[in-house]
Amino acid sequence: MKLIELFAGIGTQRKAFEEVFEQCETIAISEIDSRPLKIYQHLFNTCPNLGDITKIQSLPKADVWTYSFPCTDLSIAGNKQGFMGKNSSLIYEVLRLLKNSPKPQILIMENVSNLVSSKFITGFNQWISLLEEEGYNTFWLKMKASDYGGISIRNRVFAISILNNKSYVFPKKEMSQTVVKDILLPPTAECFVDNYEYIEYPYNYKNSIKICDYNNGGQGNRIYSINGKAITLTATGGGKGGSSGLYLRKEGLYKLSGIEMARVMGWNLDDAIKMSQVATNRELGFCLGNGIDLTVFTKIIQELKNQSLI
Ligand SMILES: C[S@@+](CC[C@H](N)C(=O)[O-])C[C@H]1O[C@@H](n2cnc3c(N)ncnc32)[C@H](O)[C@@H]1O
């Protein structure tokens, strides 16, 4: 199995493929940001980076390309210029490369759920038509991580495009009983935000539990119970909670550490610790907030294998 990761980030795609396929070789990636790249290199020891996608002429033969392209022009928090925006228009580089390279059997995309909102669905459907002209059938679904075994309520769109008139069926929903308190490590001074009276909330593995706003509220200034699911990590989270938001612990009010944020995104403890060896909490918040939920992505890849599509 040969994989190419475009817009690779920290390599969530590669990690998922390596979990599912014994034989998996990542033959090339494209990424320009040194923050995810140093984490990628440390996690996998190899980083076959071709750099800026706009400068790549063609790609070598591979079975799968992943292209979780920048969401900055599509997300609710962004400037909403859509597929014509400076960053999100990089999706068309994938089309250019498809025309100039041996076509992979499968293309996989992940992006913000706003991609299929009334504002952007026409552009997304046009993208699907462009892929159809190249021979691909596309299947997409909005998936909330907690519905598929994840710890957070992150809601994202996943699209699988396949050559040769083949179909793909997404994994079935399956919740896990894990909540935030299950992945917490002993609290650290760096993540401490304020003293706060502890209140125990009933355990709820189906959703996050909002307690109240902190100060003036707003993103990153909302307090959640550790007895529920985690809220969605954001790359550039504002407020006292930064990327993770705020959680009420017995010891006071805390944001999540980099290791805890990696756990929220489905990474095992060993990998989460490894990431923290080369990146600060803030950098990890940025990279993981930009990233893909590993639990969900692994299930999607497992289905490709189960359905003998690779
Ligand atoms: C949504 S993030 C992908 C994160 C990745 N899926 C993960 O799990 O870590 C998009 C990535 O595209 C990268 N990017 C932006 N412009 C690029 C370009 N011209 N060439 C290659 N990568 C680019 C960004 O640095 C960012 O890491």
Image: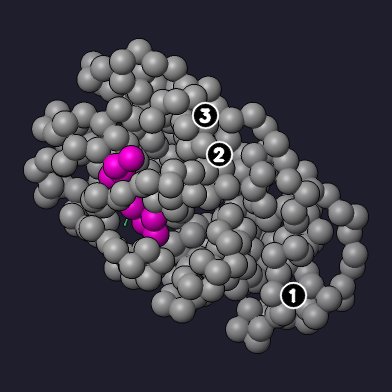
Residue positioned most to the top: 165
User: How far, Cα to Cα, is label 3 from label 2?
Assistant: 10 Å
Q: Residue at x 32, y 36 (%)?
A: 64
Q: Position of residue 14 (x, y in %)?
A: 39, 50
Mark 1 falls on what kind of element? strand
Q: Residue at x 31, y 49 (%)?
A: 25
Asked if residue 111 is among those painted magenta in the image, a careful observer would answer no
Q: Amino acid at mark 1?
A: Leu
Which is more foreground, mark 3 or mark 2? 3
Q: Position of residue 33 (x, y in %)?
A: 29, 63
Q: Amino acid at mark 3?
A: Asn
Mark 3 burial class by Cα count in 10 Å: few <14, some 14-19, many 20+: few
Q: Which residue is mark 3?
A: 306
Q: Residue at x 41, y 26 (%)?
A: 309
Image-based side of 310 in relation to 255, left or right: left
Q: Which residue is mark 2?
A: 299
Image-based side of 310 in relation to 185, left or right: left
Q: Amino acid at mark 2?
A: Lys
Mark 2 falls on what kind of element? helix
Q: Position of residue 40 (x, y in %)?
A: 36, 64
Q: Which residue is mark 1?
A: 253
User: How far, Cα to Cα, is label 2 from label 1?
Assistant: 34 Å
Q: Which mark is residue 155?
A: none
Magenta residue span: 1-11
